[in-house]
Amino acid sequence: MLGLMAARQAGLDDPARLRRAERTRRVLSLELNKDRDVERIHGSGINTLDIEPVEGRYMLSGGSDGVIVLYDLENLSRKPNYTCKALFSVGRSHPDVHKFSVETVQWYPHDTGMFTSSSFDKTLKIWDTNTLQPADIFHFEGTVYSHHMSPVATKHCLIAGHRQEVLAVSWSPRHEYVLATGSADGRVKLWDVRRASGCLSTLDQYNGEKSKASSEAANTAHNGRVNGLCYTNDGLHLLTIGTDDRMRLWNSSTGENTLVNYGKVCNESRKGLKFAISCGCNPEFAFVPYGSTIAVYTVFTGELITMLRGHYSTVNCCVFQPHFQELYTGSKDCNILAWIPAPREPVSDDISEKSLPQHHVNPAYEDAWSSSDDEG
């Protein structure tokens, strides 16, 4: 790290390289923060979390009791020990509270004035944050397991919501009209909402090699229910998880299964499973609920890095805060836990070019001065 800092200071290295290295170090040192609590409001399991992308300060949670809570994550007390307070909640006494379990909450991607929620009560609600009143309510014939708003759309404000057996949905962060969905039939489909036919492709775990697949497994992404999917931050890959205890990484452009082996990824959830992927690290990491723990994998090699332990019951959801490389997780134990990077050990301020590895020094910056006065 000292070498990277010196190289940046001397102008010998790209500053982005130091940022990636420090973000990666912080993610690899994540630990349960014993000094930071999240105020306990929910009386039953927590199904979904979302941190607004503008400031990274406010977090929404939705629970099995139908309650929605908004938290302020900033430490206003400036003390080492503090509690992330609930600013408000849509509790059981609220006239517009969801009747049944809230499965997904999401901030409007461009400001904190609006957020959305969907529930097993077959409704999707658009909320005005300031008045805490629903601006609109959509009623469906079937259960709404998941919904998602595009983080990059500039020409539409569509919300993708699926009913009955579609358990996971996500807009591409790269293409504003492209959408991925995961279903209980084991299929993952990519959609372009501009096309009349809609479906672009159905992902095939065998990459078209039908001789290796039974007729029942052909054109399926998993041999079980697909209840979780998440794009990488650049939108080039899609990570999916199924009740076949497998996680798969797909090239989102070609639809090819990259065949990364993550081993057995225990997944007993009968509904949507919310996992997260890091942002700005090298390599990138996936944070996956795994029973009462959170498994941390490298996305592109499949290596299991660590298991984060702290919850007393099944973990349902996690959300990554990219501004400070923090992780928040929600569980059936009614708790939200904060995982933060371990503090860095103190280092010497004496950083010079001598601390740089020799291969870091650009020959153009090497000292070519000669002490000979006779030259010329």
Image (cartoon, rainbow, N blue to C red):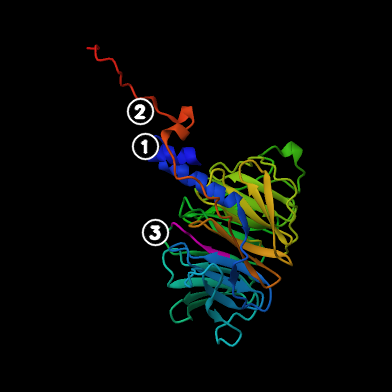
Q: How many marks?
A: 3
Marker disc for residue 169? none
User: Between disc 2 and disc 3, whose residue precedes?
Assistant: 3
Tell me which residue sits at (61%, 85%) in the image. 92
**Which label sits in the foreground, 3 or 1?**
1
The reply to whether residue 161 is visible in this rendering is no
Q: What residue type is labelled 2?
A: Tyr
In depth, the one of 338 and 190 nearer the eye is: 338
Q: How crowded is mark 2: few (under 14 residues within 10 Å), some or many (20 or more)?
A: few
Q: Which stretch did the figure color magenta?
A: 147-152
Q: Tell whether position 208 is magenta.
A: no
* Residues tagged 3 and 1 counted as in contact (Cβ below 8 A): no
Q: In which quarter of the image is the C terminus?
A: top left
Q: Is residue 369 left or right of residue 156?
A: left
Distance, label 1 to label 2, CA atoms, is 10 Å
Comparing 375 with 96, the one in front is: 375
